[in-house]
Image (tube, rainbow, N blue to C red):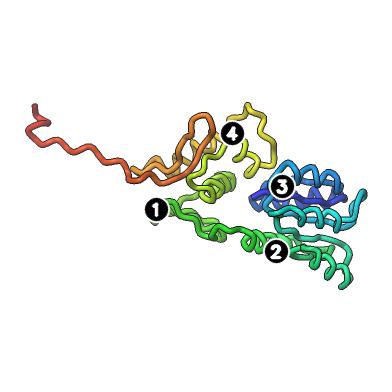
Amino acid sequence: MRILVIEDEKRIADFLCRGLQGAGYAVDAALTGGAAMDHLHGTDYDMVILDLMLPDMDGLKVLERIRNKKLGPPVLILSARSGLDDRVKGLELGADDYLVKPFAFVELLARVRALLRRGQPAPERLQVADLALDCIRRKVTRGGETIDLAPKEFGILEYMMRNKGRPLSRTMIVEHVWDMDYDGLTNIVDVYIRHLRSKIDDRFPQKLIQTVRGIGYMIEAPDRPPERPPEQAPAERQA
């Protein structure tokens, strides 16, 4: 999941970015409305956190431009404007939620998770063959066996399972899971895919993570698991 934080106070922006990254999200930050629009034109975000008092334009103008997109992400307004009129206007212009500063980060995080669940067409429980991922409890099982994953491993697996059967490039994986741009040289995705395979594929006959030559990776269940070679009869083994 990738979130854009639009906040002109760098101290608050840094605080939000650190907290959201610690919760497992990839985060970009924009200090102005213009920078925010550049981010929104170049990247598909799963959610936007929007301050209204920006130095170059009113945050409501940014909201209007987001809502002019055919498929815009959910928007959480985070503002010091606490008046009822401000909140009503923000919601009427298309914001999905409104949180007043100062705020408790645990409440903001709960609202972020609620909006992401509401905006996601995919179910909260993902399944590929006997591999199951619980997006809310952040648990993974295969064949009923619990599999422990590091946060980035979980993020990659969730992204792949939400797009099962779809080839995903390394660029797409990095941009959705890490808060960084893909420079064409890093092997970070390949390293994490090896980690994932060792945990969810190596001990099972049916391999789910597929390498797509020239593109990257995808996850899907083959039509049927590979058959084990037949055992030799005693007489054949002695021959």
- Name the residue tied to disc 4: 188
Rendered location of residue 123, percent (x, y):
53, 60
- Confirm or deny contact between disc 2 and disc 3 (CB under 8 A): no
Amino acid marked by disc 4: Ile
Residue nearest the viewer, comparing 146 with 40:
40
Q: Which residue is drawn at 71% across and 58% down?
A: 74
Of callouts 3 and 1, the N-terminal one = 3
* Residue at the extreme right of the image, as rendered: 55
Please, what is the three-letter code of the amino acid marked with disc 2? Arg
Q: Residue at x 59, y 44 (%)?
A: 152
Which of pointers 1 and 2 lies earlier in the amino acid sequence?
A: 2
Q: Check disc 1 and report the residue beneath it.
A: 130
234 relative position to 61: left or right: left
Residue drawn at (71%, 50%) of the image: 3
Q: Where is residue 176 in the image (x, y as percent from the top left)?
A: 64, 44
Q: From this viewpoint, which residue is outermost toward the left?
A: 235
Where, quadrant-wise, is the C terminus in this rendering? top left
- Between the residue at mark 2 and the residue at mark 3, the CA separation in whole angstroms equals 16 Å
In three-dimensional space, the C-alpha distance between marks 4 and 2, rounded to whole angstroms, equals 31 Å
Which is more N-terminal, label 2 or label 4?
Answer: 2
Find residue 9 and name its label: none
Marks 3 and 4 close (CB-CB < 8 Å): no
Q: Which residue is tagged 2?
A: 111
Q: Residue furthest bottom?
A: 84
Circle 2 sits in a helix, a strand or a loop, which is it? helix
Mark 4 in CB contact with mark 2 (< 8 angstroms): no
Label disc, if present, on residue 27 of the rendered structure: 3
Query: What SS does tag 3 mark?
Result: strand
Query: Could you tell me if the residues under marks 4 and 1 are in contact, i.e. CB atoms within 8 Å?
Result: no
Q: Position of residue 115 (x, y in %)?
A: 67, 62
